[in-house]
Amino acid sequence: MEVRGVTKKDNKEVDKQEMMKKYDKESTFRTNLGTWGWVTLILGSALTIFQLYTAYRGAYVSLIQGAIHLGAALCLVYLLYPIKSSLTSKRGIPWYDLIFAAIALYANFYIIQNYDRLINEAIIFGFTYMDQFVATAGILLLLEATRRVVGLPIVIIAILALLYGMFGNFIPIIGHAGNDWPTLATKMFFSSSAIFGIPIQISSTYIFLFLFFGVILVKTNIGQFFNDLALRLTGKYTGGTAKAAVAASGLQGMVSGSSVANTVGSGSFTIPMMKNAGFKPHFAAASEASASTGGQLMPPIMGAAAFIMASYTGIPYNEIIVIAIVPALLYFSGVFLGTHFEARKQNIRGLSKEELPKTNKLVKRLDLFLPLVIIIGFLLAGRTPTYAALFAIVTAFVISFFRKETRMSLKGIIKLLEEGARVALPVIAACATAGIIAGTVTTTGLGPKIAGGIIDLAQGQFFLVMFFTMIACIILGMGLPTTANYVVTATMAAPALLAFDVPVIAVHMFVFYFGIVADITPPVCLAAYAGAGIAGANPMKAGVTAVKLAIAAFIIPYVFVTNPILLLQGDVNAFNLSISVVTALLGMAAISSALIGYFATNVSWVERIALVACGLMLVYPNLVISLIGLGVFGAVSFFQYIKNKKEDASKQQAVV
């Protein structure tokens, strides 16, 4: 029964929010703040306005910019996120969280107030007891805030990093001189190489703006437009509903950096549609989860980690988004092929013309693409990410007034500013805590030691080094958000591959990819769990199926490390790039069909083995091996064609 005054749309929104709270730590914020809601509204709006102001006028020095950014964020975390997720509906804010919020704000304001002394006199004459107390309080409050808004795994790793920084002199093989706590705490909190290192510096300049850009695009209802556009383009073909889900998630990935948020946001529309078309619940969940996870690989936002990648690699951000295009398209092609083979296997047809969105209605909404065109165009023209994001935000804001349903009042604008800050809180906390880990790794020399350990474990074998690095990235990715996972793996695992003279961008993309696919890799596959919750499917079955569909993400990184042409590195020309892309696509088609169990018709186990073998040979960057793989692929295709003809003939005879 529907409650009076509550529409089906309202109920659907409530279901989405409950699903997000169940599978996404970032969504477990308080919903009944009482009078304190005005404080979060003002503080959140102030943080967003500060970010927009510094984007326009120029950022402050990194330590001051970071302190304002982190201080406001930590204060908001304690006001919005309770000590336990089960307390989100409790009215008001407990006294201890108010104290924590005030101390967190003061600890960061202390840096601004004492900036000159901290960076000049304190380094020579030493830090005062007050400095040590503030640094300790700042670190502890950061870790607790991160636990609330991101989760426990990253906090555990950060604590282990701090313990290593203190007691490294007691650790054999990978040890170091060690530090006392006052020295370590002040080094972590008052320098621009740890908490206020590169991750938080990038967060306080680029990342926040792009996240706010995504919030405004959601306000313009661009998600529904992407769904309708994808359905119009692919819906009429075999398994069109699943293909539309893949295409829509790829488009939404351009403005969102969260696998779970993508899955719940678009999945609430696409998963029921796929089930109605005939796809099994676990497959519908897996399709949405694998496509939504791939959204983090799609330029221009790429889960926000691309901004940090630009700083770590020294490659401009506008070049990274170009470099990432071919691998991202290959990934989505792989998922697309998997859904196609499953649809053929289940004999699921496309939608009728009457069921598809009308072209004229889509044309009327083409203006929604303008902010994306501006942001990509400005970046490709060589403008800074800050400049591009700022102009795109203004454009998206203006577009929101074109339609009555998205037009905002003054109150709506203020709420939008607050939401922009709230959406950024998990990323800010993760970046700051990842800074502790990265700072420890770099200042103690742990990174090269871990790299040496990986190489020794692999006995110098390049492919084993890649494999062990992949395992490390996936394990870390199961507990860390994408941005934090990239920071950790880029400082700890990437040096092992760099020792083999691999292009730096290939190494960083390698660890970035495998950190992301952790969201669909069992046993901890949150995106697949979220999709299964919507579909009413077995979560583990959905996770295993998602891995099958996203198999390209497990293959492509090996390909672009051994064949950097896919990343537009090395001897790049139209012929070499075309050959690499075509063989990669054929290889993924072969492997996808083997995993799904269907090509032109059902495949036997012998054919599956042959398809996997020829698929791997096709993606291997060696012309002779690829040609052999192509021959095997042709032979299997021929046998499949003959088998399909015989089956069709048998069916016709049975009908007669």
Image (spheres, grey):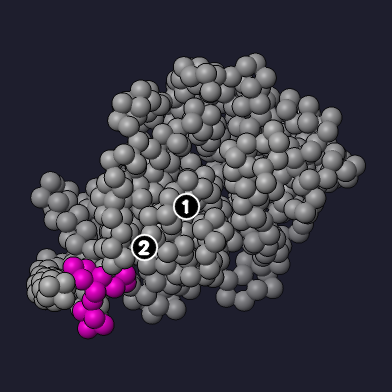
Residue 138 percent location from the top left of the image: 76, 45
SS at badge 2? helix
Can residue 292 be seen here? The reply is: no
Query: Is 309 or 528 nearer to us in this picture?
Result: 528
> Is 421 located above or below residue 579 in the figure?
above
| Residue at horizontal 48 percent and vertical 49 percent from the top | 267
Q: Nearer the viewer, residue 344 or 177?
A: 344
- Image-quadrant location for residue 440: bottom right
Q: Magenta residues, as a range? A: 595-607
Q: For the view shown, which residue lies furthest in the right direction?
A: 95
- Quadrant hosting residue 320: top left
Position of the C terminus by quadrant: bottom left
Instruction: Say which amino acid is labelled 1.
Output: Pro
Say which residue label 1 marks. 272
x%, y% of residue 478? 55, 63
Q: With 640 as the anchor, is 147 left or right in this view?
A: right
Q: Is any atom of residue 484 visible in this view?
A: yes
Residue at the front extreme of this rendering = 656
Q: Position of residue 586 (x, y in %)?
A: 19, 62
Residue 264 within the magenta-colored segment of the rendering? no
**369 up-or-down from 433: above or below:** above
Residue 192, located in which quarter of the rendered image? top right
